[in-house]
Amino acid sequence: MPAEGRPLAARLAGLPIPHVLLSSFQVSPVDLAQHANEFPLVIYFYPGGSSSPDDGHDGPMMDAAQHRAFRDHHPDFVAHECRAIGISSQSEQAQQKSAGTIGISHLLLTDPELQLAQELELPTFTVDGKSWYQRLTLVASHGTIDKAFYPVPSAARSAAQAIAWMQVHGI
């Protein structure tokens, strides 16, 4: 079956994490591919500024639930020698506000130009002329995507879902 006819999750598995430079209020810009080559990553994409079609009007609440889930599962990620990263197209200032309010210690990166969406053909949506990421979770090791979870049925359970998958697959 051609790549464009395969489901998104199946199409992404096996692809390398692309070299994109993303900024953060927490650290200097990060080359995501280099980061993915250094240690396993769980990358979660979230709208971060608008309600997605999947979340309805509860988008910001779902973002907060997802951030808390990744924050609360931090010890599990450490046990797997893995790093969690949240990515959205929202501004660094908005991410900083969320991180402070929720107490996020993991890395949040901003991709306002949706570079990763373009490189990997990730799902986005547009509201009032601004584009946002749809919820998606990637597990990557050795610089390659091992698993993609899409759609994300529960923002609050996406961290646990990724950890369970890593346990079963020895990552």
Image (cartoon, rainbow, N blue to C red):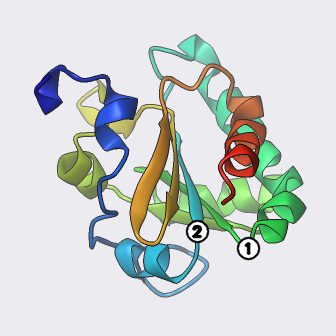
Query: Where the C terminus falls, by quadrant?
Result: bottom right
Front in this rendered view, residue 74 or 81:
81
Q: Which residue is mark 2?
A: 40
Name above or below for residue 51 compared with residue 158. Answer: above
Front in this rendered view, residue 138 or 170:
170
Q: Is residue 145 left or right of residue 39?
A: left
Residue 29: x and y, percent? 42, 82
Amino acid type indicated by mark 1: Glu
Residue 149: x and y, percent? 52, 33
CA neighbours of label 2 inside 10 A, class few (<14), some (14 to 19), many (20+): many
Amino acid type indicated by mark 2: Pro
* Inter-mark Cα distance, 1 to 2: 7 Å
Q: Is residue 89 left or right of residue 63?
A: left
Name above or below for residue 105 compared with residue 94. Answer: below
Residue 17 visible (yes or no): yes
Q: Is residue 157 left or right of residue 46?
A: right
**Dot placed on the residue nearer the N-terminal end, 1 or 2:** 2
Label 2's element? loop
Front in this rendered view, residue 1 or 101:
1
The residue sitting at 69% across, 36% down in the picture is 158
Pointers 1 and 2 in contact (CB under 8 A)? yes
Residue 156: x and y, percent? 76, 31
Label 1's element? loop
Residue 103 visible (yes or no): no
The residue sitting at 29% across, 54% down in the picture is 15
The residue sitting at 57% across, 26% down in the picture is 152
Q: Which residue is mark 1?
A: 81
The residue sitting at 76% across, 66% down in the picture is 80
Q: Is residue 25 left or right of residue 142?
A: right
CA neighbours of label 1 inside 10 A, class few (<14), some (14 to 19), many (20+): few
